[in-house]
Amino acid sequence: YKNNFQKTIRVIKGTNFDYFSDKAKNIFYNENFIVTSLVDRMGIRLKGPMLENTVSTNIKSEGLVKGVIQVPADGNPIIMLADHGTIGGYPKIATVISADLDNISQLPPNTQITFQEVNLEEAEELYKSYLKEINKYSKFLNEYN
């Protein structure tokens, strides 16, 4: 199955961003990753250029949040979704911003993804705009119930 979907996903730097080489950081923000068929409510496995890190890929386990992007030893990112585990031991390069979480949950296999870095203030403003849009549709739907 092929599709021509492309999506830019906005992220903030992860808690282990500094664990990755400069080359890996450059690849993460400038190359395409493909949504694989390994998608479920726990996460989305991506395929793309290998993201090398500068420390062991098995780090001390720590808490996970929805949208965090872990990078296991194979160098292919995994985006954690709604039913993700509570802890994980792979380095976390970034976290998808809240305003983009609904979008990534609906991406079909073979979608090309690029990541765009935003800072925390931008992420908060984007989330406020997202909530306004959702509330607008909610009010519209409530008028017809």
Image (tube, rainbow, N blue to C red):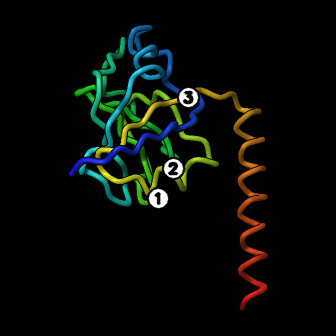
Q: Is residue 123 above or below residue 101?
A: above
The residue sitting at 78% across, 58% down in the picture is 132
- Of tags 2 and 3, the one toward the viewer is 3
Name which quarter of the figure residue 13 lies in: top right
The Cα–Cα distance between marks 2 and 3, rounded to whole angstroms, is 18 Å
Location of mark 1 (residue): 82
Tell me the element at label 1.
loop
Q: Position of residue 48 (x, y in %)?
A: 29, 28
Q: Nearer the viewer, mark 1 or mark 3?
A: 3
Q: Position of residue 131 (x, y in %)?
A: 74, 57
Check disc 1 and give the amino acid type. Answer: Ala
Query: According to the image, label 2 marks what residue?
Result: 66
Q: Amino acid at mark 3?
A: Gln
Residue 116 is drawn in which quadrant?
A: top right
Furthest residue in direction top, as rendered: 22
| Residue 115: x %, y % from top left | 49, 30
The three-letter amino acid code for the residue at tag 2 is: Lys
**Could you tell me which residue is drawn at 40 percent across and 10 percent down?**
21
